[in-house]
Image: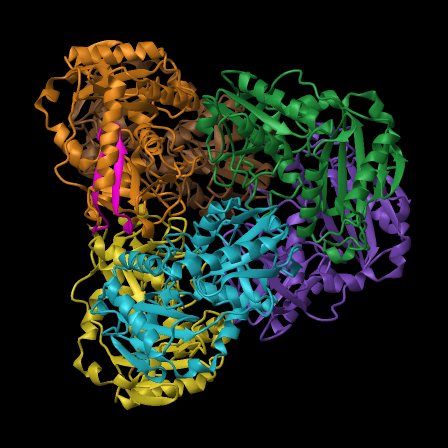
Chain colours: A cyan, B yellow, C orange, D brown, E green, F purple
Amino acid sequence: MTESPENAVNAHQAAADPRNDTLKLYLNGRIVPKAEATVSIYDSGFMLGDGLWEGIRLHNGVWAFLDQHLDRLFEASLALDLDIGMTRDGLKSALDETAAANSMTTDAHARLMVTRGIKSAPFQHPSFSRQGPTVAIIVEHSKPSIPRPIRLASVAHHRGLPLTQDAKLNSHSKLNCILACIAAEKAGGDEALMFDPFGFVNTTNSCNFFIVRKGEVWTSTGDYCMNGITRGHVVSLCRENGIPIFERNYSLVDTYGADEAFMTGSFGGLTPVGSIDHRPMPAGPGPMTDKISALYRELIKRHCSGVEAA
Amino acid sequence: MTESPENAVNAHQAAADPRNDTLKLYLNGRIVPKAEATVSIYDSGFMLGDGLWEGIRLHNGVWAFLDQHLDRLFEASLALDLDIGMTRDGLKSALDETAAANSMTTDAHARLMVTRGIKSAPFQHPSFSRQGPTVAIIVEHSKPSIPRPIRLASVAHHRGLPLTQDAKLNSHSKLNCILACIAAEKAGGDEALMFDPFGFVNTTNSCNFFIVRKGEVWTSTGDYCMNGITRGHVVSLCRENGIPIFERNYSLVDTYGADEAFMTGSFGGLTPVGSIDHRPMPAGPGPMTDKISALYRELIKRHCSGVEAA
Amino acid sequence: MTESPENAVNAHQAAADPRNDTLKLYLNGRIVPKAEATVSIYDSGFMLGDGLWEGIRLHNGVWAFLDQHLDRLFEASLALDLDIGMTRDGLKSALDETAAANSMTTDAHARLMVTRGIKSAPFQHPSFSRQGPTVAIIVEHSKPSIPRPIRLASVAHHRGLPLTQDAKLNSHSKLNCILACIAAEKAGGDEALMFDPFGFVNTTNSCNFFIVRKGEVWTSTGDYCMNGITRGHVVSLCRENGIPIFERNYSLVDTYGADEAFMTGSFGGLTPVGSIDHRPMPAGPGPMTDKISALYRELIKRHCSGVEAA
Amino acid sequence: MTESPENAVNAHQAAADPRNDTLKLYLNGRIVPKAEATVSIYDSGFMLGDGLWEGIRLHNGVWAFLDQHLDRLFEASLALDLDIGMTRDGLKSALDETAAANSMTTDAHARLMVTRGIKSAPFQHPSFSRQGPTVAIIVEHSKPSIPRPIRLASVAHHRGLPLTQDAKLNSHSKLNCILACIAAEKAGGDEALMFDPFGFVNTTNSCNFFIVRKGEVWTSTGDYCMNGITRGHVVSLCRENGIPIFERNYSLVDTYGADEAFMTGSFGGLTPVGSIDHRPMPAGPGPMTDKISALYRELIKRHCSGVEAA
Amino acid sequence: MTESPENAVNAHQAAADPRNDTLKLYLNGRIVPKAEATVSIYDSGFMLGDGLWEGIRLHNGVWAFLDQHLDRLFEASLALDLDIGMTRDGLKSALDETAAANSMTTDAHARLMVTRGIKSAPFQHPSFSRQGPTVAIIVEHSKPSIPRPIRLASVAHHRGLPLTQDAKLNSHSKLNCILACIAAEKAGGDEALMFDPFGFVNTTNSCNFFIVRKGEVWTSTGDYCMNGITRGHVVSLCRENGIPIFERNYSLVDTYGADEAFMTGSFGGLTPVGSIDHRPMPAGPGPMTDKISALYRELIKRHCSGVEAA
Amino acid sequence: MTESPENAVNAHQAAADPRNDTLKLYLNGRIVPKAEATVSIYDSGFMLGDGLWEGIRLHNGVWAFLDQHLDRLFEASLALDLDIGMTRDGLKSALDETAAANSMTTDAHARLMVTRGIKSAPFQHPSFSRQGPTVAIIVEHSKPSIPRPIRLASVAHHRGLPLTQDAKLNSHSKLNCILACIAAEKAGGDEALMFDPFGFVNTTNSCNFFIVRKGEVWTSTGDYCMNGITRGHVVSLCRENGIPIFERNYSLVDTYGADEAFMTGSFGGLTPVGSIDHRPMPAGPGPMTDKISALYRELIKRHCSGVEAA
């Protein structure tokens, strides 16, 4: 998944916060202690990965880019023919309520999950589970820090064609990304660099991916990866600040020859890449990554102070 | 998923058994009432579809083809780098224990599920969840009956390439099959007929698929679908009984022109197909389907009376 | 084919005009009554679909965008190595003559067809039919009206790769589109929504296809569909009027999530889409479709009053 | 199309028979002189290539393998949802009647064509033409002779995927084969050698294709080419006569390195290939081609004397 | 290869210069007579095509666009994990030294080659040859002249996917281009027009390819062909001079219908195309080709007079 | 390349033989000392990888399976339109002469290389190099030994489609295999496990690949890899000895779940695989590998004692 903090290095840092052991979570309309936030093993999410989710940061009391996250969630629900059963306002209230229950106002990260709900029998057909969704929200204390740049390893596992499983769905069926991540780890990487079905550089297993070449920023066409909200902001920020940005096909040769590379996601914002296939990036976590990172932090700050719409 | 009763028609019948409301289930070493069979929303299965499962029938006190199911489960676990943490005997005991807790000896169907377990933080990387799997077993009273032949609708959603997500993995990430099923339902079908990535007829969304043409039985190559255990038995039974059987590429034209068609799965055995894209099968639930169905019931009987090895 | 009125709903309306029963048509240099407009069953068009055609509207005495239609026809004839045997002026005169024979000056639609002509023997090789083409022109009274928005159904049949059969050829070999249309009808649709070979949304079986998302207009790259002349005008009109327009890959999820959708073709101009796979469009035949429709009608008016070149 | 005499060299010979100038043909239930065998330019076959056909030889008063041809025709009609409106016996009578009208008993070749009939309006949707098919039969005097072996030229135009247009449909939409044939002619060949979409050697533009390598006979898998009836007989004859025969993928290198090559079709039976891409076949029209050709002539003789079922 | 003079027609002209018989060449740090410029048959370049190269023109004492050539060479060396063992300055000195040894100041063409060096044993693994590269430089007297426009023939051999062999690598493994060239020659062409793996027009076997349509210049996306330096300059020159230029997918139909076509490469600059598949270009070596050719010659002149950076 | 000893582990052992420092080699008709076995940097093999080769073992005075190697070489030369300029007997004499010059009778390995020869100018077109081939033969003392089982790493680099570069050509253009090998080394492997373009397990970078599953032996279809001569013998030996052998598609899941795996090549015969992607093979270098290895050694012994034809 793109919009989240799942790369191993900075996520492990975040995961270490002891306050997260005693969280209160949201489950189907109620705030419950972490230990009671459970679902039946008949849940469609557990059995079949039949659900959708969003990762959303809380910054200075504001859910960053919440409208965009809810747009994406509701749009995906049409494809799944999944009735979320709550309004946008209802979801926002649930997020707020969960944060409040944990006295969080900033440096927190939510995972808002909606599955097709408990099945009446353990069978795949959605007709066994359309009675109502499971809505669950985790919000954790999290402040990403990057002890060292990420090591990427390219892997043979790739993202699929749109009719295999649409990359635009941020779903609970993430096994192909996990297989890629395992392959990367075996090859000595922290995170997998995944290709599209034709061999162009596409995305990492949990984030979007960018390279910097001679002052230009390149990312994949977006056709075969999550339409990351942070990705979208990076593209816009480049355009607004006169940084040449291209959404295009490019290959491994182009990537090894890049000056810098970085990943994007809601959790970590921009995360610099230190090496790809054990070839260090020439400019390391370089000046362009720093520059766009600063622009992005600035954007969040503006956005979360209410100065500007999401 | 191939090895299960998930086609809507016969499954709904089975699901109606009121005894299933008060089942006892297996969860991580304990037998618990159905209502207590819950997992944390931090479970890898719930969050990410990161798990594997098998559907296994109990017949006359014997788990049908259990060795083959366990072979497939342990083989898949290598690809996921997922330590099941139990031996084959341990899993068998757990199945037996669950059946016993519900006083079941026959006409029961188990869903044995293994996920990567509870994550320490809501992130994709497997390193957050490798501490131990979640092992859950549902066994339900179930006796498939077929009120009417299945109506298939072909859909644009297809199964993927092996490096997108290996069709050999019977996983908890089943969203692409569910999307196909929804599309079929919209088109007036009970179940989806899915193609492989190149447009050859492949499988239904939850079962394997066979056609009968002029006394020959055809099924797909198996390259892009679940290596169904019932499928394997049908192929073997045809060979042993002089019925010409071909695992081969074939197209929609070949399929519309078939005399009969049937689906296979552990739950339902052979299920006849009544129509494809609103074109009725000429021979309906025809003589070849009946013949192989009888051979398969005979095989289960022999197998489950201990006369013959799985 | 893209440039024509072939979607079932508005075409049926048009087809109902009783004046069309007694038309006069053009065939190889002569104006003949409809009943005498026949070709040998040895004709290359009849036997093999070996021909090309254009659909052209007559508006206020002017053939709309005739130069573009003739450019496309002559360009395609190079690929088929088919000598049309008439000049552009000759073809225009033939169109005029046919319209005049039916006293048509507006609200009429021509189908100009050129096949490789009568074969000396019923064999595929073009050398049996290169002696001269068959040129036939039908002009019908037609005023498209839309009793209700079109229902689209997505189908598995897709348009092919350029070397299978170039989508740029508006030919008499349309069977793949017809197969798609039949599949859509079986699924409860009026017209098929077809993908490209990789699963991106591409075109309908007889028209080009556009979606509207948050004020932006999206259509496919054009790589795998007819280079529709109306499509081209819609793209240009958007550019000229400050409406963001993108020719790009997009998926079914993007499409279900669209606010509006419409089809384009020479016959119907813009035709609003009411539902896709039984999911109604949120904004129905919405404001953007109306806006561009008005711009297109204005363009035709200008073009056909001689104010502006095609 | 596979089952026909369309390769340029032997077809031209056949086409030269002057008796074919004054044929009587079958059209929708009537025997008519050749000059009156015409269809409206509104016919679905002419406009859109929306029809199916079979090429069938008359040998000693018997239509060779007629049952197989009718099986294929009726099977294809299911895919097209095209009601032929006649029984198998009715079609056979029509063939007989046409032959009788021309006093033919042997060395004659029929082209039995069925299109969706005359459209009520010139639009693609089948609903405009479902009222009844056009059934037309041409039978020509023809005795294939081969003045010289065929020169094949491989071309970039290939046959498509099954969901682009199913190779199992022997339709009136043959433009992609014609484009291939034109390309071959430009490159100095009589007939095109076409690949499948992945680059394996597949078929020629109008016939099936076989190579002979070290005593083995190879042909393509059949997945992407017409399921030729002659092709099927060649495969069966090899099996019955102990000649190793393989339906398999093979490449251009395998083909250039073959000892012999031949084409098959209903019209010409086996036609030897003299060169491929200007590389002469080492063994020319060699001993294996001669051997199988003799077996095939023997089969037709037996079949058409009533000794053996089709 | 793109950046070189390898099309047969103008190259043969150039090759005829008798001064090239007695050249002095550079080999691993030394200037040697042509006859002594030899490598072991254990060289990685000879055995396995394991090397990289650049073609660079000398114009008025300046190596045209040398920085870009060296950038591309060093970038490619990262992908091959090949240590060139010399600095950029070192390579430039070697080029200068070679030119000086032959008293060349202009109208000369260099081929700078770097292979993985002599292997200790005749095995594929790079570990047998990492001890040091072979660096060789040929500079020949050459002044391209074009006795007649090039005849292109389209061929079935195509350029591969990026993970088959990255088109961005200008390597010593050029067999697929050579196979295409041979196929073109058999079909009556001087040079092959190659498609990408999906059938879009891509490149010729040794140059980049452009078409001109109604005042617009089109070339392929660049995804599947060499990132030619001349190609890049043509794109830039069009942009700077208000000539509409599109890097896009286009098909054979678009290409046959073009007004002009030309090839680009370091050796020949722009080379006009006279015919494609024996279809003459309508506008021949036309006005747009002339215009851009003049702009390119101007650019080289400026660049090589030191007025402007590469 | 398949038929050779290039896997790093056993090859390095072989390469250590000091007698190989002072070999005599064959070059264009002459026996020369190793140091004088050089070719011009204008050689087609060096510049462009434009050549073919075979690896052949000398065993007890007999070139193992020489006829098969020469068949493959001459067949490939047709595709390259490369006139070898020597007869089969001439090549055999050259091999014998080279072995004799080094007093070798057994435990020696030849690399017989044929390139298109010296080019008159440094351009790609074959017309610059058709004047005559370069024929070179290296024969080295070599006795493969396996200090430890091979570690395979799967990589994203795959073998190409037949029209990209035919896998049946054992050419001098091996860069894609070398790129795969480098990727494997970075991931901690000795040799790369390569997929076909669709993601099925295919081959290693220099050998063919087999797995053993429950007493069955599986290898890829052979469509996308070298038609290895040792591979062919292993397939035949299995058939002759009642070992179930399947040439089929299979995936990474099937491979991780295998009991044993081995590679084949002319140099090493059968080489056991110890691990794949750091997952050890359960049965290690197991009993089936040993059994087939023994059968293969036996075959060579019989073959090279003249008891049996190649």
Residue F260 appears in the picture as rendered: yes
Q: Nearer the viewer, residue D275 or F248?
A: F248
* Camera-side residue of D112 and F208: F208
Task: Relative to C281, say whether A15 is above or below.
Answer: below
Foreground of the two, F240 or B81: B81
- Secondary structure mostly seen in the magenta stretch: strand
Image-quadrant location for residue C49:
top left
> Which residue sits at x=57%, y=31%?
E236
Q: Is residue C264 in the magenta section?
A: yes
Q: Can see residue B3?
A: no
Please report the bounds of the magenta region as a residue range.
C256-280
For the C terminus of chain B, the image quarter is bottom left
Q: Residue shown at 71%/64% (left/top)?
A: F297
Residue B295, image x, y percentages? 30, 69
Q: Quadrant of residue C207?
A: top left
- In screen coordinates, is E259 left or right of F84? left
Indicate whether E100 appears above or below E76. above
Queried whether the magenta region covers residue E5, the answer comes back as: no
Residue F254 lies, with reference to residue A25, above or below; the image says above
Q: Quadrant of the N terminus of chain B?
A: bottom left
- Image position, residue E122 (x, y; %): 78, 53
Q: Quadrant of residue F187?
A: bottom right
Percent position of residue D286, x then y: 56, 33
